[in-house]
Each structure stands twice: as C-alpha cells, then as structure tokens.
Amino acid sequence: MQDDADGDGRDPDADPGSDVEQDPNAPSATHRSDADADATTDADAAADTDTATDADAATEESVEGVDTEHVMNLTFVLTLFLGVPTVVVLSLFVPLDGWNEIISFVVRVGAAIWFLTAVTLYVRERIRE
C-alpha cells in the first residue's frame, strides 16, 4: 500500500468515501459468482416448497367440510367453561380423601367432558356444512 502525501497510510487510488481496507484478491460486492446464484436459487426453491407445504396443511385442517381448527378451539374453551363448574359440583358429592383421589377424579371427569364436547361440536359443524 502506498502512503499519500499526508502520510496517513491511505491509498491515493482508493475510493475517498471508503475507510475500510479491501482485499484486492477478494471478489467485489457487485460481482456474484455462480455458486452464490445457485445458493440463492436453492433458497428460493426451499421457500416455495415451504409455502406449498403450508398451503397443503391449510387444506388438511378442513376434514370433509368441517373446520377442525375452529372445532378444536371451541372444544378447548367450552371444556374449560363447562368442565370446571361441573367438576366442582360433582366433587361435592364424592369423598376425596387425598391428592391422588382428587387428581384422579378431576382427570376422569375432565376427560369425559372433553370427549363429549369435542364429539358434540364436530357433529354440530358437520351438520351445519
């Protein structure tokens, strides 16, 4: 590298707006090699494949005209809305002596409520369509 007249170590032939030294053997920023182009093309193809997969997944959410995502969301909300008061009321009439009995009771009753809610909502959506 040649010193300029000021002696600050800058190359007089270098771009005046550039303060960063560049390797003369490195490819320029504007030059794209074939490998870079292939990598970009592969990334674009992968993105297209991901988009197609997302579109396929969206069509799989609907089973025979039933929006299963809607059914699952409603099942979750209604199971909590209906299940908690039901478990509390039913627990008043059952002797629950320890945590094992309490947890077992809640799981059994909650599973039954969840199953009935899910089947009811699925049949309701199937009839609506």
Image (cartoon, rainbow, N blue to C red):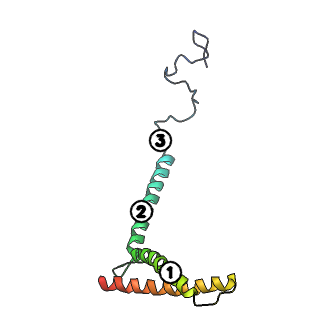
Callout 3: helix, strand or loop? loop
The residue identified by callout 3 is 32
Label 1 neighbour load within 10 Å: few <14, some 14-19, many 20+: few
In the rendered image, residue 100, in percent from the top left (x then y), is placed at 68, 84
Instruction: Name the residue at 49% across, 22% down.
Output: 15
The residue identified by callout 2 is 51
- The amino acid pointed to by label 2 is Thr
In the rendered image, residue 39, in percent from the top left (x then y), is placed at 50, 51
First along the sequence among labels 2 and 3: 3
The residue identified by callout 1 is 85
State whether residue 14 is above or below residue 80.
Answer: above
**Quadrant holding the N terminus:** top right
- The amino acid pointed to by label 1 is Pro
State whether residue 109 is above or below residue 55.
Answer: below
- The amino acid pointed to by label 3 is Arg
**Quadrant holding the C terminus:** bottom left
Check the image and name the residue furthest to the front. 92
